[in-house]
Image (tube, grey):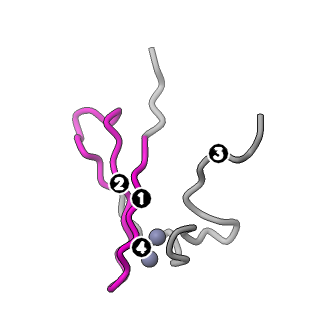
């Protein structure tokens, strides 16, 4: 197993995209009834247009 899995934050807990702390980022599910559809995470800092699409780790049956 390598460790190159997609991580949203670096070692300091900052967003890899915009460098802001992950803390003000919000996660939005496209469909709250079906998280397998994924969602997006965006930075809430003013003037920052960081948006990343994410997938939720769901346990598969
Ligand atoms: Zn940002
Ligand atoms: Zn960001």
Which is more foreground, mark 2 or mark 4? 2
Q: Which residue is mark 4?
A: 24
- Graded by Cα atoms within 10 Å as few (under 14), some (14 to 19) or many (20 or more), the crowding at tag 1 reads some
Q: Marks 4 and 3: in contact by CB < 8 Å?
A: no
Q: Give the image quarter of residue 55.
A: top left
Q: Which residue is mark 1?
A: 52
Q: Give the image quarter of residue 15.
A: bottom right
- Provide residue 9's location: percent of width, then percent of height: 59, 63
Of the image marks 3 and 1, the number of the one nearer the N terminus: 3
**Residue at figure coordinates x 77%, y 34% from the top left:** 1
Q: Marks 4 and 2: in contact by CB < 8 Å?
A: no
Q: Which residue is mark 3?
A: 5
- Provide residue 29's location: percent of width, then percent of height: 29, 47
Q: Which residue is mark 2?
A: 40
Of the image marks 3 and 2, the number of the one nearer the N terminus: 3
State the count of labels: 4
Of the image marks 3 and 4, the number of the one nearer the N terminus: 3
Q: Marks 1 and 3: in contact by CB < 8 Å?
A: no
The answer to whether the beta carbon of the residue marked 4 is less than 8 Å from any atom of ligand 1 is yes
The answer to whether the beta carbon of the residue marked 1 is less than 8 Å from any atom of ligand 2 is yes
Give the magenta range.
28-55
Q: Secondary structure at mark 4?
A: loop
Question: Quick check: is 44 in the magenta stretch?
Answer: yes
- Provide residue 16's location: percent of width, then percent of height: 57, 67
Q: Marks 4 and 1: in contact by CB < 8 Å?
A: no
C-alpha gap between disc 3 and disc 4:
22 Å
C-alpha gap between disc 2 and disc 4:
14 Å
C-alpha gap between disc 2 and disc 1:
5 Å
**Residue at figure coordinates x 45%, y 30% from the top left:** 58
């Amino acid at each position: 197993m390598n460790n190159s899995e997609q991580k949203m934050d670096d070692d300091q807990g900052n967003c890899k995209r915009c460098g802001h702390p992950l803390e003000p980022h919000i996660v939005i599910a496209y469909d709250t009834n079906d998280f397998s559809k994924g969602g997006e995470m965006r930075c809430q800092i003013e003037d920052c247009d960081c948006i990343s699409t994410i997938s939720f780790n769901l346990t598969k049956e």
